[in-house]
């Protein structure tokens, strides 16, 4: 009863109560799971705030994991914004106050030199997916230190809910090297190390030790890097991607979900990928990640890399990313264009006449009325993605995008927005949620036991996701399938990813003839099993 993976609460049967010595420890009426779900939802839905609902869900996860996943899977539309963005952002900000029971592993400076030994403290041995953060760039909220643990916990819950990866094969990890967030350091309830961030070689060595320790302790684990600061995210991705089975969701997962949205949006606007001109707001992990995958997609369509790069223009906090600038890091330089330096957004739109605005700047309100009107003049039917998370950071709202473009925009966002009625039309804005992509990638990697995760896998995932958007979805401006179908989406992506792993010689498992059937057999179903 104390172990959330085994506990059934009031659902223990009469026979189980006798056999397991549980008589008297639970109320006499044996309740079915359906009634347990009802009971949970009654109080849950009466809560006055999303943070309270988040606490309810976390407590349920800590008490009865099967019931938690039943609720989350069955009501995925309702629960996704709670277990992930936007509510998880709030939960991370208040982590020290809402902490109830430890979940996942904390690897801090104190564990340096013995991380492998510490990982062996984890009670489960067959770990297949690890999500790790160092808390330095949580969503668009900045450095939240050890409070960032909410992110790996949330992402792994999505691996299970969206792709049926067994929760006992998942491990959330927070690498704690301190925080530079003074208000957290001053907060008596802060649970992380009370020091400023370790940087430089000492930081790299700790991450290196962690990666080696994982390879030693959990050799089949996929490691997903999450919410690392920009300067570390790119470095670690290129450092580890050829050595271990790893990817960075902020860079590659975002890229895939955005590219998929672009493919679907083009079915509405009627254009071709090769004829688009993309203007990215924000040249960080998310923005340049999308840019790189767009380039990969275009080169697959026959363009040279140089031609493909000419379709992708970036604005960062200093203006248009052009060759004459001397302040560009490597990932921005790859997109620097031959153009006069411009700063004013409207001037840039007039000069470039983009067909798509992709916002990943973390700067709310960047897509002003004037910007959207200019983009509509330039493109007719502009693709407008406001990807910054959480909702408070979005470049514009769904309502603004539809109104200011007079219903012409094809809109998607990072955090969810409700439907919008505009001049007799009912729009259902798509959420470019990475959860459409990473769980399926993880499932495909798990099924094939792939040694590495490649960019081609993200390209395949984007195409597969786009292929599942129906004409009815498009009629409402919805460029992603309904969340209800997310398990089917994940299975379809997993099949393609596993095939690709086999084709590229990365699979360590021989794939069965009925690959899809085999993948379906792997899926965790949140049902109680009988102990007697
Ligand atoms: P980052 O810190 O790596 O990059 C931010 C970029 O924005 C930098 O290049 C910066 O120069 C630029 N910037 C700042 N002010 C600007 C302005 N006024 N106009 C144009 N550019 C400006 O951050 P990262 O990881 O790229 O994330 C950015 C945002 O994207 C965050 O809010 C994050 O939550 C969101 N995101 C959304 C995802 C999704 O919707 N699926 C997934 C990953 C990230």
Image (cartoon, rainbow, N blue to C red):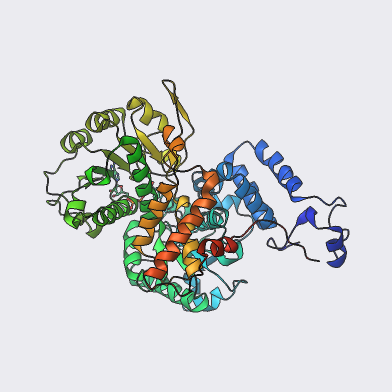
Quadrant of residue 306 in the image? bottom left
| Residue ID at (36%, 64%) | 454
Position of residue 415 measured from the top left corner of the image (x, y, whole percent): 45, 42
Q: How many marks?
A: 0
The answer to whether 456 is drawn above or below residue 124 in the figure is above
**In the drawing, does residue 406 fall left or right of residue 179?**
left
Looking at this rendering, what residue extends furthest in the front direction? 513
**In the drawing, does residue 447 fall left or right of residue 140?**
right
The answer to whether 399 is drawn above or below residue 236 in the figure is above
Q: Quadrant of the C terminus?
A: bottom right
Observer-nearest of 12 and 267: 267
Observer-nearest of 300 and 14: 300
- The answer to whether residue 131 shows anywhere in this view is no
Q: Quadrant of the N terminus?
A: bottom right
Position of residue 329 measured from the top left corner of the image (x, y, whole percent): 23, 58
| Residue ID at (72%, 58%) | 528
The answer to whether 284 is drawn above or below residue 223 in the figure is above
The answer to whether 201 is drawn above or below residue 29 in the figure is below
Looking at this rendering, what residue extends furthest in the top direction? 423
- The answer to whether residue 503 shows anywhere in this view is yes
Position of residue 378 measured from the top left corner of the image (x, y, whole percent): 22, 32
**In the drawing, does residue 18 fall left or right of residue 121?**
right
Observer-nearest of 451 and 62: 451
**In the drawing, does residue 318 fall left or right of residue 412?**
left
């Amino acid at each position: 009863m104390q172990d959330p993976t085994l506990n059934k609460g009031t659902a223990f049967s009469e026979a189980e109560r006798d056999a397991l010595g549980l008589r008297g420890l639970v109320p006499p009426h044996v309740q079915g799971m359906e009634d347990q779900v009802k009971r949970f939802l009654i109080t849950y839905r009466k809560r006055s705030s999303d943070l309270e609902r988040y606490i309810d869900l976390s407590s349920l996860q800590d008490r009865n994991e099967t019931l938690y996943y039943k609720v989350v899977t069955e009501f995925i539309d309702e629960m996704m914004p709670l277990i992930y963005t936007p509510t998880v952002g709030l939960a991370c900000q208040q982590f020290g106050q809402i902490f109830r029971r430890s979940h996942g592993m904390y690897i801090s400076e104190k564990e340096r030199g013995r991380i492998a030994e510490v990982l062996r403290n984890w009670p489960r041995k067959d770990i297949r997916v690890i999500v790790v953060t160092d808390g330095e760039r949580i969503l668009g909220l900045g450095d939240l230190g050890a409070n960032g643990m909410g992110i790996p916990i949330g992402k792994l819950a999505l691996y299970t809910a969206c792709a049926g990866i067994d929760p006992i094969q998942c491990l959330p990890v927070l690498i704690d090297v301190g925080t530079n967030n003074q208000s957290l350091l001053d907060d008596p309830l802060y649970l992380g190390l009370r020091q400023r961030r370790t940087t430089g070689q000492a930081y790299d060595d700790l991450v290196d030790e962690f990666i080696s320790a994982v390879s030693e302790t959990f050799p089949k684990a996929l490691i997903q890097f999450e919410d690392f600061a920009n300067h570390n995210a790119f470095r670690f991705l290129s450092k580890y991607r050829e050595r271990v089975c790893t990817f960075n969701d902020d860079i590659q997962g975002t890229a895939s979900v955005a590219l998929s949205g672009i493919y679907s949006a083009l079915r509405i606007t009627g254009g071709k990928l090769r004829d688009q001109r993309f203007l990215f707001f924000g040249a960080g992990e998310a923005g340049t990640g999308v840019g790189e995958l767009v380039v990969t997609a275009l080169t697959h369509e026959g363009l040279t890399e140089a031609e493909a790069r000419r379709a992708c223009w970036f604005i960062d906090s200093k203006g248009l990313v052009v060759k004459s600038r001397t302040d560009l890091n490597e990932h921005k330089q790859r997109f620097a264009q031959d153009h006069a330096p411009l700063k004013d957004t409207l001037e840039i739109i007039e000069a470039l006449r983009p067909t798509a605005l992709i916002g990943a700047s973390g700067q709310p309100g960047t897509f002003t009325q004037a910007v959207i009107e200019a983009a509509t003049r330039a493109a007719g039917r502009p693709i407008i993605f406001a990807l910054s998370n959480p909702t408070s950071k979005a470049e514009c709202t769904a309502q603004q995008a539809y109104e200011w473009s007079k219903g012409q925009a094809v809109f998607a966002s990072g955090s969810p927005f409700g439907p919008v009625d505009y001049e007799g039309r009912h729009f259902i804005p798509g959420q470019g949620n990475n959860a459409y992509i990473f769980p399926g990638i993880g499932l495909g990697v798990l099924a094939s036991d792939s040694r590495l995760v490649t960019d081609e896998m993200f390209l395949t995932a984007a195409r597969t996701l786009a292929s599942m958007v129906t004409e009815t979805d498009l009629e409402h401006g919805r460029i992603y399938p309904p969340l209800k179908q997310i398990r089917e989406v994940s299975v379809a992506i997993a099949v393609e990813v596993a095939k690709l792993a086999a084709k590229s010689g990365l699979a360590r498992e021989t794939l069965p003839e009925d690959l899809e059937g085999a993948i379906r057999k792997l899926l965790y179903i949140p049902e109680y099993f009988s102990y007697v």
